[in-house]
Image: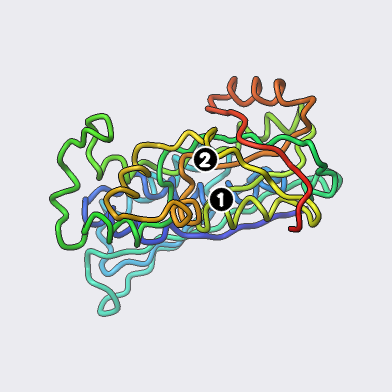
Amino acid sequence: VLVSGTDGCGTKVKLAILMDKHDTIGIDAVAMCVNDIICCGAKPLFFLDYIACGKNIPEKIASIVGGVAEGCVQSGAALIGGETAEHPGMMPQEDYDLAGFAVGIVDKKKILDNTKMAEGDVVIALASSGVHSNGFSLVRKVFDIDNNPDSLYAPCAALGGKSIAETLLTPTKIYVKSVLALLEKVDVKGISHITGGGFYENIPRSVPKGLTAKINKSAVRVLPIFDLIQKTGNIPERDMYNTYNMGVGMSIVVPASEVDTALDILRANGEDAYVIGEIVRGDD
């Protein structure tokens, strides 16, 4: 079965433009697509990108596409083509937008459809690399980035000495190879890519009616950037968990009997994986 997914990087592109740093935003574009299709068990085959720009500046485009290529390497997908469209008069010369799509493949009998999920199954978190590619309109407002971009570059004690800019532009983590390794050995019941909508909107998508995911909030290893966003913007905790990944880029549901095996495989493949909850009876 062929599986496809398409996405962009949202207003994270605006931050890349402000910083004049374009070599990682392409990783985000690939990640947002391949992390989605792996949720049903599909292995990415290929990716195509689309760049719309005010003016085609070859060095900038090369940098963007270099990031796309790196994302494809990380996910094992082929970059088989793309399109760069120059839109003079439609957007400022320095502006651009980036999107793309991925196509993957999975055996029909191996498609993850949550029908085998049961009460007592365990929810495992895969740590995120940061904000990933969602909620950047709020980020820009919280830090007043559009009006005060210089504030981005100073070392920030709350971020371990890194600047806000460096932390925010950290590319989205690609989980494909780790999850494919897990699928070979463990009976995975469901996968959620934590994107826009955070915990509240993404995790329930992988859980069938009659069951619900009970997340232990104290187990979630919240990254410092989210504490800083919440404190600076005075944002209610529920809104944070309904907007951002909070340090959990992907959640995976496995049988309780296979938790240790799953954690070993994920950690052996470079993931910071840990248990954050369980599946219980519920209305949704």
Amino acid type at circle 1 is Phe
* Circle 1 crowding by C-alpha within 10 Å: few under 14, some 14–19, many from 20: many
Quadrant of the rendered structure where residue 184 is?
top right
In the picture, the disc for residue 120 is none
Q: Do tag 2 and tag 1 residues touch (Cβ < 8 Å)? A: yes
Front residue of this view, candidates 63 and 220: 220
User: 260 or 44: nearer the eye?
Assistant: 260
Label annotation for residue 248: 2
Determine the residue positioned at 68% across, 55% down.
205
The residue under the point 70% across, 51% down is: 206
Q: Position of residue 161 (x, y in %)?
A: 22, 30
Q: Quadrant of residue 84?
A: bottom left
Callout 2: helix, strand or loop? strand
- Quadrant of residue 159 within the rendered picture: top left
What's the residue type where badge 2 is placed? Val
With respect to residue 211, does 137 lie above or below?
A: below
Cα separation, mark 2 vs mark 1, equals 9 Å
| Dot 2 or dot 1, earlier in sequence | 1
Above or below, 34 relative to 147: above
> Where does residue 57 sit, x and y in percent of width and height?
25, 59
Depth check, front residue: 119 or 8: 119
Q: Residue at x 56, y 60 (%)?
A: 6
